[in-house]
Image (cartoon, rainbow, N blue to C red):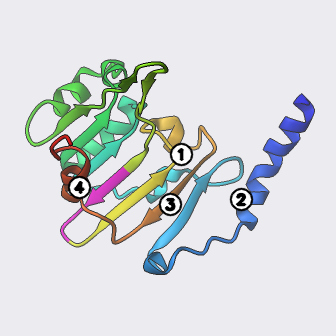
Amino acid sequence: PELRKAASYRALPAAVRKTQFTPATPLRGSARLRWQGPGSGALDQYLPKSGRKALVVSPFLGATFLRPIQAGYQEVIVISTQQALDEISDPQVQARLATGKSRAYVVEPVDSDDQGPVLDLHAKIFVFENTNERTVFIGSANGTRNAWHAGNVEVALQFAPGFSVETFCDKFVWRERV
């Protein structure tokens, strides 16, 4: 069984390269399937380097991923778990999340009566805005260097124009509880 897993893992890049991706009609012409793995470039080559606002929604974070986003964007909103935010070892990255226009929000899991925590954060959504354009990435990549710089096998759907940081926050962060 282990040899079969290794062989299928080695075949993954070729299978992904052969995959035909046809987006739904509203996204046709604006959506691209991006991936990284053995034999491909890093996902971070597709990230916009600067702009007005950036939104990072991820259960795992790394200072080496967040630092260039903070340097290139006037406002950075991070939505993650308390554990992920506490594990950011760079005090400068932590400080920048608590000052100016940037901020961090913690997603707390909801407890069920019989199953323990449910609805824990698993989403990975990245929104980048400048004055002319909004680019969104939704996929498997967390907010870490390995996820965006060729350390992991990852897939992300990139589309532009995408939804705004404000729209996302209005719908999922600031809305009143039902």
Q: Which residue is mark 2?
A: 16
The span from disc 3 to disc 4 (Cα, nearest Å) is 17 Å
Residue at figure coordinates x 40%, y 56% from the top left = 47
Amino acid tagged 1: Ser
Q: Residue 15: name its quadrant.
A: bottom right
Nearer to us in this view, 82 or 115:
115
- What is the magenta range? 126-131
Q: Position of residue 143 (x, y in %)?
A: 42, 38
Q: Position of residue 140 (x, y in %)?
A: 53, 45
Quadrant in which the C terminus appears: top left
N-term mark: 1 or 3:
1
Number of the label disc, if any, that sits on residue 140: 1
Q: Position of residue 45 (x, y in %)?
A: 47, 56
N-term mark: 2 or 4:
2
Amino acid tagged 3: Leu
Q: Which residue is mark 4?
A: 165
Residue at figure coordinates x 22%, y 44% from the top left = 173
Q: Position of residue 31 (x, y in %)?
A: 48, 71
